[in-house]
Image: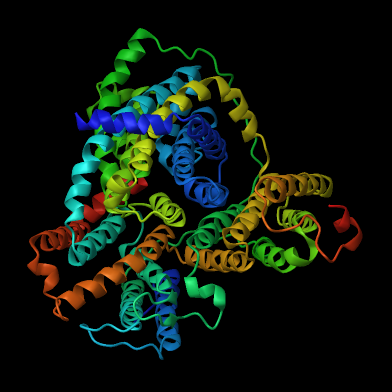
Amino acid sequence: MDIFANLWLGASTAFMPMNLFYGFIGCLLGTAIGVLPGLGPTATIAMLLPITFGLPPESALIMLAGIFYGAQYGGSTTAVLINLPGESSSVVTAIDGYQMARNGRAGAALATAALGSFFAGSVATILLAVAAPPLAAVALNFGPAEYFSLMVLGLVASVALASGSLLKAFAMIVFGLILGTVGTDVESGTPRYVFDIPELYDGLNFVAVSMGIFGICEILRNLESEHERSVGVKRVTGLMLTKEEFKRIIAPVLRGTALGSFLGVLPGGGAMLASFASYAVEKRVSPNRAEFGKGAIEGVAAPESANNAGAQTSFIPMLTLGIPGNPVMALMVGAMIIQGITPGPNVISDEPELFWGMIVSMWSGNLMLVILNLPLIGLWVRMLTVPYHLLFPAIIGFCCIGAYSINNSVFDVFVMAGFSVIGFALSKMRFEPAPLLLGFILGPMLEENLRRAMLISQGDPSIFVRSPLSLSLLIFAVVVLALVLSPSISRKREEAFTE
Amino acid sequence: MLKIRNGRDFVGGVTMICVGLLFIWFGRELQVGNSFQMGPGYFPTMLSLLLMLIGALIIVQSLMVETEESGPEAWNWKAYFLVILAPVGFGLLLAGLGLAPTMFLLIVGVATASRYANWRHSILLALFLAVCSVVLFTKLLSLPVSAFGPWIPFIGDLF
């Protein structure tokens, strides 16, 4: 079997002491930062990206992936213990998790989250290993027209699944695409929007941009409504589940894993959508639905499995097609480009160690999280008591050095400052920053493929509908758009996001 | 009678139109070309037009759809000013002062943005982070920036 040989190759990369070490550091940092409220995974990864520049590509990506699912995990710990979700995908976990903690079952809730996450992570990893190679093989036959249509579909779907106003999300995508054109035009060598600034000839740096619109911008918003947190943490006792509790979580974990794996693959999907959807499903189908909101263990098991599965499978489009579905994956694409790897279907054949190493490291990372985090809960809780007025200056300091270290130039620090202003102004007008980053990353690829396709067809736009594959991708995009715009669905969508 | 029912969206739509105009203006010398041979200006110009169209739609929507007004927002101008100026100051001072003093000043300065800040904590935190950043970035990751820059001649010579 091919897959076992591949996984073996991956294991021999992922279990190299150095990669295990960086995976471990990534999980640890990710959890620590996931625990801290007011710093989401996107900002975290943007902030920590510069320290991975000096590492070999495998170690760098393994560490970044570790940060990502570590953050996922850390967020749920605080959700359970102090009813404060560390990040958006654990918002629903807080509902029942915190009630369980109040009933003295904090340990059981945390153990459920850990076990559910680990199970879901393992399943999603296998899914990734099985689904990625055939998908990449299909993608290898893609011409520029197909790529263009695929990216259009990705962008449309990411808008459809995001929260907030559709029009505004589209505006952000287009704005991001325009920002992506800053720099030297690859085909003609003409500088665009560079204003004779030499640093701009390579374009705006995406790390600086995302640190500005996610990292610094979050601080600005947090400082607006600053209040001291009083942390009353329950002592965590009894990590063991009772036999009856164990029986109760089996079905929700399975359902959460299935739903999360599916939603994670969709563009714009990923962990947050997965956790919300699975909680809503559980609330309908569970035999104990009366207990929901009062500390039902199913209300922890399902969303925690779903968000971990979703986080893992959102790597599938990124690794096989080179198309990021959410801002975190956009940062991973950026990290790969910095490491000199072109994301896309060629990664599997050109960089098998990297590809399979990353997949196996996801599994080993999940295992580390389970082994590490349950005993370390005391430490995470203590981190929560660090007051915000000491935390945010450190974050700003770290962002400044991080931006500087990208090219060893202060220009990127100014770019970061500029984008924090832009991001903040946009958020005041209720524009979401996530689609902007997606557009920004996809912009150059979209333009390149559009121009190539038009060159092949000699300026005839019908090339996008003549290829059956491209046509079906575009039809799919239109269907998604129509579905979201139809009144009944848009009402449901609003309900789903307000719930 | 047209009435602005959603002020925030109205401003948002106008902003998007202005952004589109800005990019068209600054890109006016780029060759647009035609759909067969797209020039460097084709893609950005088309996108700017699209952005202006979306901006116009947002404006129309803001005139038609009523929103429930959320409460007045807290504006914290002192915090905005400090947090946004901090990286700029960092960028301007880094080459001259070196990493350690710049980091120290950055932390002490930006910490005052919080209403819970107190000087003793800020200074201790700043000292701690200045030392950490020098150890991590100039020593371990060997970033090409010295701990003390040319503006501080005597201590700088010691490192």
Quadrant of the frame with the N terminus of chain A:
top left
Q: Answer above or below: position of A320 versus B5.
A: above
Camera-nearest residue between A64 and A238:
A64
Q: Which quadrant is home to the C terminus of chain A?
A: top left
Q: Is residue A232 visible?
A: no
Residue A180 drawn above or below residue A263: below
Task: List x then y, in percent, for residue A208.
Answer: 54, 61
- At 50% from the left edge and 80% from the top edge, which residue is drawn? A194
Depth check, front residue: A175 or B130: B130
Q: Residue at x 74, y 49 (%)?
A: B134
Give the quadrant of residue A316.
Answer: top left
Of residues A229 and A61, the one nearer the viewer is A61
Farthest right residue?
A: B154
Image spot of residue A119 (x, y percent) = 33, 25
Find residue B151 and report its image quarter: bottom right
Q: Is residue A460 above or below residue A370?
A: below
Q: Is residue A374 visible?
A: yes
Q: Is residue B88 above or below residue A294?
A: below
Residue that appears at 45% across and 86% down: B26
**Image-based side of A451 in relation to A246, left or right:** left
Q: At which x and y percent is residue A319?
A: 31, 47
Residue at screen point 9% across, 65% down: A467
